[in-house]
Every structure is written in structure tokens, then in C-alpha cells.
Amino acid sequence: MASLAFPLVDHHCHSVFGGDLSPAAFAGLLTESDRPPAPGTDYLDTQLGFAVRRHCAPLLDLEPHCPPEEYLARRRALGPAEATRRLLRAAGLRTLLVDTGLVEAPGAGPLLSLPELASAAAAEVHQVVRLETVAEGVAQGWVSARSYGDDCATALAEAVRDAGAVAVKSVLAYRHGLDLEPEPPTETEVARAAGEWLEHHDQHGGPPRLVHPVLLRHLLWTAVELGLPIQLHTGFGDPDLTLHRADPSLLTGFVRAVEPHGVPLVLLHGYPYHRQAAYLAAVHPHVYADVGLALSHSGARAGAVLAEVLEVVPFGKVLFSTDAYGLPELYPVGAALFRSALGGLLDGWTADGSWSAADADRVAVLIGGANARRLYGLPGA
């Protein structure tokens, strides 16, 4: 197999829950759904659920594919700290770029802090600031509609500086969809939209949730001014999004508008629109494609999904991630499926003479970490 034994750079992930988990909470973290399973079904009976028992059971001194109840019992016997340490370190990750917009796991509780995550994984950790979280924090304090746009820009710059962030991320796909007007809104439009949003929040109470399309556009363009890479969720996710509005091709107008600014746009996940993401990365110099999340959830079919991503995209534009969240198991599973999928493809292409072995090894290094180090300005770039 092409050499993939080197430590990987996980350019998009989240922290994990470090405590004990009930069987229901464990299974619930194996799905993008926030609903219980249908009667008579189980989220363990999925490609991801099977991949966890295949790749993680040996890390806890069990046979691959052991019964779920045996796996969970061993996990409890080891204790959450030891199980988490074993699982994270087995992933073989050198660097984690962590989206800190999520702080709790549903049904579980608070996630590990970044220092705790770094210690458990024995990896370098950098922060990715979530745009909508910052904007919503601004709305929680006293703010006028007229000053909201400037206040948001100031808060975002401060959040990035204080965190030493290497990138920012948007969940626009969840809040509105990717089909936004591409150009930045005017100051008048932002003030009017802020007035509408803040008035709605005052009337209805609860935590502010940024869904106004004008303010989401303003937030994206505020991020462009920072110059950092912008990660954008595309493709499938939890039921909060409408799938066809998460197609990355809907971002084409925005992609064109951003190009003169030279700010990198990183299209995360993509599935089932991963070919569209690969196409955009192929034709626009500032667009990159990610192969996270989809590989974990496609499990035994990860190689087929990755092959479709690699059909047209330049190999210097593809990035590895796990998108691990909540369960520490998702780190070694994501890394193992990536290594197996890419290694299998490269071996096949070298065996039939399509690629040289030297090129296969070079591309493995690019996708596994060198592309991320170059894009985000990480040590070793």
C-alpha cells in the first residue's frame, strides 16, 4: 500500500465528550440526525457504526466487530479518560484544527477544552472560529441596529486574534442555505436587517439565532476582510438544513466575487455533492475541497466516495479531515478509513501503470497534511 503511515493533519474537527456515555447517547453520536432512531432500528446498524466496531474494538483490547454491548462494557471498564486517550492517540494525528462553535454533545454534556483535547490526543491544536457564534454573541449584549455591522466586525477580529485562529467557519448552509446573493450588502441594508433581527429577538426571547440572509452575507464578507481561510459547511448534515440548498455549486456567484480578494474558501464534506465541490476546486484557484465526514459515514464505501472526489480536482487542493465530534471513536475511524481508502486507490492506480509509485507517495503526503499546512500557514509548511 502507498505509504500513509505518517501523522495526519485533521483540518476540520470538533472536541469530544470525556465522560461516561449511556448506550443511547453513544449511538446518538453516530448519526447526523438529532432524532431518535425509528422503532426497531439502531444507529449502530450503519456503515459508521460497523466501522467503529471494526477499527476501535482492537484499540480497547477487543476483537474487531465484537457485539456492541461488549464494546460498550469494555469502554466503561476502562473509564472515559483511558478510553479517550487510547482512541485519540491511535488516530495518528499531528495537528487538529478545531471548530469551537460546539461546546456540548447532545445527551452527553460539555466537551473537552482545547488543552484537554490536545493532551489526550498528544497533538498540536489550533482553533477555528465559527462566524455565527460570534455574531450571535454580539446580539446578546446591548447593540443598536445602526452599529451592529461594525460591532460584529470588531468582535470577529477580536475573537480571531484572541484565539490565534488559523481559519473561520460558517454554517450558512444550516441557517439559510448556500443560495445567497453573492455581493456584500450595503451599510443601509445591514442596519435595516439588524433592526428586523434584533426586534424579532426582543419579541420572542431565547438565545439569538442568526438566520437573516442579509446579515449572513455581511458576516461572510466581514470574514473575507480578515484574509483567513473560510471553511463552509456544504452537503449533508443534521435535519436543520435543507439538503438541496447545501449544494456547493450554489456558492458559485460568491466564489467568483471573492476570487479577486484571494481569500481561500474551503468546501467541507460535500456529500452527496462532493463532485460539485471537487469541480469548483478544479476551476477556481482559491477553492479547496474536503474529504471529511462523508468518508466516515460511508464506511466500507469510503474508497468509492474518495475516488469520485479525486476524478477532477488538483491533488494540491484536497484536504483530510475527520469532522469528529462528541465521540473520540470518530477520530481513529476517520483516519483509518481515509488511510485505507486513499491507500487502496493509489495502489490500484500504480498497479495498472496509471500512476508511478513516487507520485502516489507524494499525493498521499499532500492530501494527508502538506496541503493543510500550506493553506493554513501551519508549522512545517
Image (spheres, rainbow, N blue to C red):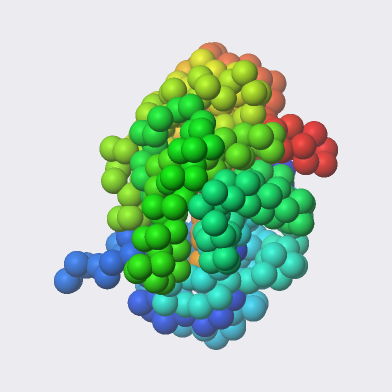
Q: Residue at x 44, y 23 (%)?
A: 253
Quick one: 232 or 68, which is closer to the camera? Answer: 232
Q: Quadrant of residue 358?
A: top right
Taking the view exactly as shown, the residue that stands out farthest to the left is 39
Q: Quadrant of residue 220?
A: top right
Relative placement, left or right, of 205 versus 367 is left
Residue 206 shows in the view:
yes
Rendered position, 219 above or below 180 = below
Q: Residue at x 48, y 27 (%)?
A: 183
In the rendered image, residue 37, in percent from the top left (x then y), is placed at: 25, 67
Could you tell me which quadrant the C terminus lies in? Answer: top right
Relative placement, left or right, of 196 versus 63 is left
Report the number of discs. Answer: 0
Q: Residue at x 45, y 68 (%)?
A: 207
Quick one: 182 or 358, which is closer to the camera? Answer: 182
In the rendered image, residue 178, in percent from the top left (x then y), is placed at: 39, 37
Q: Residue at x 66, y 54 (%)?
A: 155
Taking the view exactly as shown, the residue that stands out farthest to the bottom is 77
Quick one: 104 or 81, which is closer to the camera? Answer: 104
In the rendered image, residue 331, in percent from the top left (x then y), is placed at: 57, 57
Quick one: 149 or 274, which is closer to the camera? Answer: 149
In the rendered image, residue 167, in percent from the top left (x then y), is placed at: 66, 44
Relative placement, left or right, of 277 versus 356 is left
Residue 282 shows in the view:
no
Rendered position, 344 above or below 131 = above
Could you tell me which quadrant the N terminus lies in? Answer: top right
